């Protein structure tokens, strides 16, 4: 019988070491490659992106002073690398080439569900280490945990830094990531990022982006942009999002669909979101790390922006772990208000609706499409 846990009661603690240990592709993308990405013939930009990224990864030279990288960013036998810095070790030379391209990296621009994260993870797997892979939020959390200078000292020892879901939500993030990318680029680190927004348009609709044009331009200058066109593969050829279940059906569906689940989280939406306001988003990965299936009672439309952005992070962590969701209440295409879905954070919210819909399909209908 499955163990039932309540995320609303959890207050996970995450150390700097825990954050650093997580800078690799999630379970969902743990074994992907360029060969497992299937380009859509109707959108030639997908095959072109594969070719350019394959060449980019092959051009990267790896290794740190004193030992080989283990593929997760740790230089074995070296005082450098992630944990060397935490223990007071000094940096070593990265032994990498800056390459011949004008920009330090590649920026994948495209809509939802065209496989940008798959391509990003494939690049990470194909490149030599030491290397790091994380979401934009995880990098800003890393700076908060280590300090800006120590984060730079750690990351500049890497051959490659991959940044998923690159977006700027406020002026502080703009200045922070501008400085971080510039310093990593100057150190010879190769960069690959994904986003739904072109570099020069980052921050539009969220704050007075025109006041930070210099920082935004610095970011844009670090990348060559590759456009990836296509339709959302999470919904390709699948039925429309299933209707929410009646509340008294949830546990019956759980027993029928997931008889072998080891850990099931069961919460009311109200209690879960209340706890999200108490737990920092950097701890959400830890919050759901052992959950096999999520049961959510009485999902409601979120009307508060701060809570909506927190739920975006939770949805990303659930999607990373491929956690099926069984839910009652409003359907997930009504998770956010109409105003939110047309506002400055609309791309984040559309991504969350797409991902949660996919997880509900998996939980309630057995269709992955992921």
Image (spheres, grey):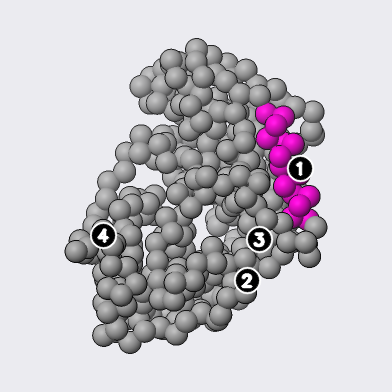
Of residue 245 and residue 211, the one placed in the foreground of this image is: 245
Helix, strand or loop status at disc 1: helix
Which residue is found at the position 55% from the left and 57% from the top? 169
Tell me if I can see residue 309 in this picture: no
Tell me if I can see residue 67 in this picture: yes
Residue designated by label 1: 52
Of callouts 1 and 2, the N-terminal one: 1
Of callouts 2 and 4, the N-terminal one: 2
Q: What is the magenta range?
A: 45-60
Of callouts 3 and 2, the N-terminal one: 3
Q: Are marks 3 and 1 in contact (CB under 8 Å)?
A: no
Helix, strand or loop status at disc 4: strand
Residue 185 counted in the magenta span: no
Which residue is found at the position 33% from the left and 52% from the top? 289
Whole-number angstrom distance, CA of label 3 to CA of label 4: 31 Å
For the stretch drawn in magenta, the main secondary structure is helix
Helix, strand or loop status at disc 2: loop
Residue designated by label 2: 236
Residue 139 placement, left or right of 15? right
Whole-number angstrom distance, CA of label 4 to CA of label 1: 41 Å
Residue designated by label 3: 114
Of callouts 4 and 1, the N-terminal one: 1
Whole-number angstrom distance, CA of label 2 to CA of label 4: 30 Å
Q: Are marks 2 and 4 in contact (CB under 8 Å)?
A: no
């Amino acid at each position: 019988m499955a163990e039932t846990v309540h995320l609303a009661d959890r207050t996970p603690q995450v150390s700097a070491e825990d954050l650093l240990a997580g800078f690799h592709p999630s379970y969902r993308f743990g074994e992907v490659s360029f060969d497992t990405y299937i380009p859509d013939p109707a959108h030639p930009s997908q095959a072109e992106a594969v070719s350019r990224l394959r060449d980019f990864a092959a051009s990267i030279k790896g290794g740190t002073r004193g030992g080989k990288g283990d593929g997760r960013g740790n230089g074995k036998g070296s005082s450098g690398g992630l944990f060397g810095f935490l223990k007071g070790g000094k940096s070593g030379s990265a032994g990498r080439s800056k390459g011949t391209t004008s920009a330090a990296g590649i920026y994948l621009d495209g809509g939802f569900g065209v496989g940008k994260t798959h391509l990003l993870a494939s690049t990470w797997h194909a490149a030599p280490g030491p290397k790091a892979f994380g979401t934009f939020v995880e990098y800003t959390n890393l700076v908060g945990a280590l300090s800006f200078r120590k984060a730079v000292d750690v990351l500049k020892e890497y051959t490659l830094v991959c940044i998923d879901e690159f977006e700027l939500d406020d002026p502080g993030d703009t200045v922070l990531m501008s400085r971080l990318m510039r310093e990593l680029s100057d150190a010879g680190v190769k960069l690959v990022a994904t986003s739904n927004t072109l570099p020069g348009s980052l921050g539009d609709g969220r704050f007075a982006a025109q006041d930070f044009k210099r920082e935004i331009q610095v970011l844009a200058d670090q990348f060559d942009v590759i456009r990836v066109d296509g339709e959302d593969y999470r919904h390709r050829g699948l039925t429309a999002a299933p209707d929410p279940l009646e509340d008294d059906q949830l546990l019956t569906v759980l027993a029928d669909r997931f008889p072998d689940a080891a850990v099931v989280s069961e919460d009311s939406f109200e209690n879960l979101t209340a706890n999200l306001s108490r737990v920092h988003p950097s701890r959400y990965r830890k919050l759901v790390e052992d959950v096999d299936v999520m049961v959510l009672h009485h999902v409601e439309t979120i009307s508060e922006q701060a809570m909506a952005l927190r739920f975006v992070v939770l949805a990303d962590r659930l999607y990373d772990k491929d956690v099926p969701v069984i839910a009652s209440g409003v359907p997930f295409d009504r998770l956010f208000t109409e105003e939110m879905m047309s506002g400055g954070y609309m791309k984040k919210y559309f991504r969350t609706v797409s991902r949660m819909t996919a997880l509900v399909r998996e939980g309630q209908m057995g269709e992955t499409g992921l």
